[in-house]
Image: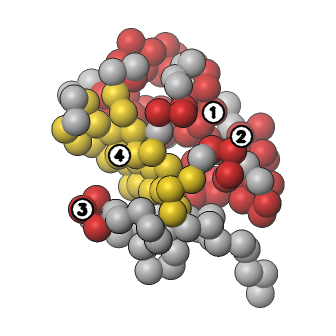
Amino acid sequence: MNNPQMVVGKVSREMIQQGDFGNHFKNEYAEYQPDSETNNQLKNKIYNVSIVIVMATWCSDSQMQVPRFYKILDQLDYNTNQIDLICVDRQKTGGSADISSLEVDFVPTFIFYRNGDEIGRIIESPEISLEKDALLILSK
């Protein structure tokens, strides 16, 4: 069985664009086509929101959804350097990044905050699509 490299802790986007996960990132990012109509609606809603992503480099849902999410944000000109990106091990611990207060059971988990308050999450896989689920959360 292939054992992909595991990254744990608070990381940068650049770090997950390398190695085994980087290959998944490149492929998913290139193939995913976000819904432009939904993205247009997201534009005015996403800039005052901060985002925490808890993911795992070994997780197939993370390998699919995280690159897609970054592609959506890139199309919106969202400053992805503002994202807190935390990689976890198989026990869902983030190494030196304590995520116990986030109560994450499944990865990836995308947590949206407005003015420091959590307004919603996308957990594991979106209900509809990443951009439509984000729009529902940000329209609250």
- Left or right, 46 with reference to 6: left
Percent x, y for residue 131? Answer: 48, 32
Percent x, y for residue 126? Answer: 44, 48
Mark sitting earlier along the chain (3/2): 2
Question: Pointer 3: what residue?
Answer: 101
Residue type beneath disc 3: Ser
What residue is drawn where x is 40% and y is 46%?
52
Local SS, label 2: helix
Percent x, y for residue 113? Answer: 28, 36
Farthest front residue in view: 96
What residue is drawn where x is 47% and y is 33%?
82
**Is residue 126 something one can see in this rendering?**
no
What residue is drawn where x is 64% and y is 57%?
63
Question: Pointer 1: what residue?
Answer: 71
Q: Residues within 10 Å of mark 4 (few under 14, many from 20)?
A: many
Residue type beneath disc 1: Lys
**Is residue 69 something one can see in this rendering?**
yes
Q: Residues within 10 Å of mark 1 (few under 14, many from 20)?
A: some
Residue type beneath disc 4: Ile
Marks 3/2: CA–CA distance: 30 Å
Label placed on residue 29: 2
Marks 4/3: CA–CA distance: 12 Å
Percent x, y for residue 70? Answer: 59, 37
Label placed on residue 63: none
Give the mark toward the camera: 4 or 3.
3
Marks 1/4: CA–CA distance: 17 Å
Mark sitting earlier along the chain (1/3): 1
Where 24 sits versus 59, above or below?
Answer: above
